[in-house]
Amino acid sequence: MFENKKIAVLGAGKLGEALISGMLDAGIVKKEQFIATAAHQERLDQIQKNLGIETTLSNGEAVRRSQLVLLCVKPQTVEEVIRQIADDLTADHLLISVVASVSSKLIENILEKPVPVIRTMPNTPCLIRKGMTAISPGRNARPEHVEQALRIFDAIGRSLIVDEKHMDAVTGLSASGPAFVYIIIESFIEAGVKVGLPRDVATQLAAQMVLGASSMVLETGEHPAKLKDIVTTPAGCTVDGILELEEGGLRVTLIKAVVRATQRAKELVNG
Ligand SMILES: NC(=O)c1ccc[n+]([C@@H]2O[C@H](COP(=O)([O-])OP(=O)(O)OC[C@H]3O[C@@H](n4cnc5c(N)ncnc54)[C@H](OP(=O)(O)O)[C@@H]3O)[C@@H](O)[C@H]2O)c1
C-alpha cells in the first residue's frame, strides 16, 4: 500500500520519531521513503543519527516530494505550518494529523481545497508497536484514505475509528495515559523496595504484572471487576490492599486526572 510512496513527517519530535521507528520496525515502510522536518538543524541531525532517514528544514519541500504527510508539530504551531504548506498540498495528498486539540475542520478551513485530512491520536508506545490510536476521518477522506491510516496504526499497535467529538477524551485517556501508568508502575516499584525487594526485581515484577493484567482485560474480554474478584480470596491479603486503595481514593484520583487532561486537550489549540 505504501510502496513507492514518500512520507513527509512534519515536526519529527518525540511522537514523530516514535511513529517513524514503529513503522520501520513493522517493515511497512523503508527508510528511503521518509523525509522528516523540524524547526532546528540540531534536531534533524539527531533524527538522521537515530533513524538514518532524509531530513530538511523546509516543510514545503517535504510536502512537494511526498504523497502522505504526517503532521506532528505542536498544536500552537499547526496554523503556521498549514499556511506554509497550503500551496504545496493537493487533493492527491493524504494529510494525517496527530496533533491534539486541532480539529480536521480547522485544518480543512485553512486549506480551502479538498485535501483529504484524517485526525488521529496515537500514543508513545507506538515506538515499540504497542500503541493505541484513535482515528477520525475528515470530510474529504475517502475509505481508501481511512484504510491507509488503519494500515499504519495497526502495524504499530491497535487502532479504532471514533467520532471526532471524542478526540479530546481520547487524548486525556490513551495519549496522556502512559504517563499516568508510568507513575503507577514507579509507585509499585517503590512499594516493592519498601517491603524488601531489590529494585531490579521490583521493577520486573511491577512492569510485567501491569502488562499481564492489561492483556487479561484485552484477551479475555472480561470486565476488570470480575478479573479483580478472581484475585481477591475471602479474608486474603488482596482485599486488605484494596481497602487501602479505596481509602486513598485511587479511582477518583485517576478519573480526575483523565478529566483534567481532557479539559486541557480542549484548550491546547489556543496556547
Ligand atoms: N508526546 C505524546 O505522547 C503525544 C501523543 C499523541 C499526540 N501527540 C501530539 O504530537 C505532537 C508533537 O508532540 P511531541 O510530544 O512529539 O512534541 P515535540 O517533541 O516538541 O515535537 C514537536 C516537533 O515539532 C518541530 N517543529 C516546531 N516548529 C516546527 C515547524 N515550524 N516546522 C517543522 N517542525 C517544527 C520541533 O522541532 P525542534 O525539535 O527542532 O524544535 C519538534 O521536533 C503534538 O501536537 C501532540 O499533541 C503527542
Image (cartoon, helix red, strand yellow):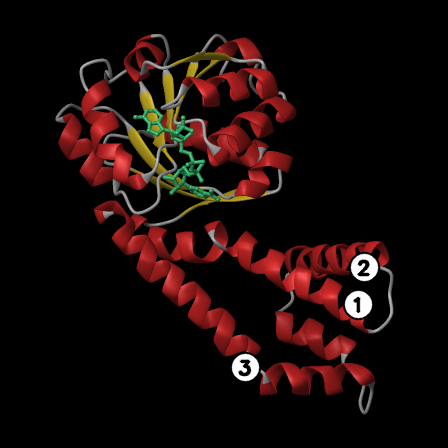
Label 3 neighbourhood size at 10 Å, few (<14), some (14-19), many (20+)?
few
Asked if residue 8 shows in the view, the reply is: no
> Is the CB of mark 3 within 8 Å of ligand 1?
no
| Residue that mark 1 sits on | 192
29 versus 175 height, above or below: above
Q: Which amino acid does label 3 sit on?
A: Gly
Q: What residue type is labelled 1?
A: Gly
* Residue 205 image label: 2
SS of the residue under disc 1: helix
Q: Which of marks 3 and 1 is in front?
A: 1
Say which label, 3 or 2, has the lower sequence index: 2
Say if mark 3 contacts mark 2, CB within 8 Å.
Answer: no
Identify the residue shown where x is 63% and y is 64%: 184
Question: How far apart, in angstroms, are the residues tagged by discs 3 and 2?
Answer: 24 Å
Label 2 neighbourhood size at 10 Å, few (<14), some (14-19), many (20+)?
some
Say if mark 1 contacts mark 2, CB within 8 Å.
Answer: yes
Identify the residue shown where x is 64% and y is 56%: 218
Identify the residue shown where x is 51% and y is 70%: 254
The residue closer to the viewer here, 237 or 152, is 237
SS of the residue under disc 2: helix
* Image coordinates for residue 23, horizontal then vertical, percent: 57, 26
* Image coordinates for residue 50, horizontal then vertical, percent: 60, 21
Identify the residue shown where x is 36% and y is 8%: 65
Q: Which amino acid does label 2 sit on?
A: Leu
Question: How far apart, in angstroms, are the residues tagged by discs 1 and 2?
Answer: 9 Å
234 versus 102 height, above or below: below
Name the image quarter holding residue 79. Answer: top left
The residue closer to the viewer here, 196 or 229, is 196
Name the image quarter holding residue 80. Answer: top left
| Residue that mark 3 sits on | 249
72 versus 220 height, above or below: above
Label 1 neighbourhood size at 10 Å, few (<14), some (14-19), many (20+)?
some
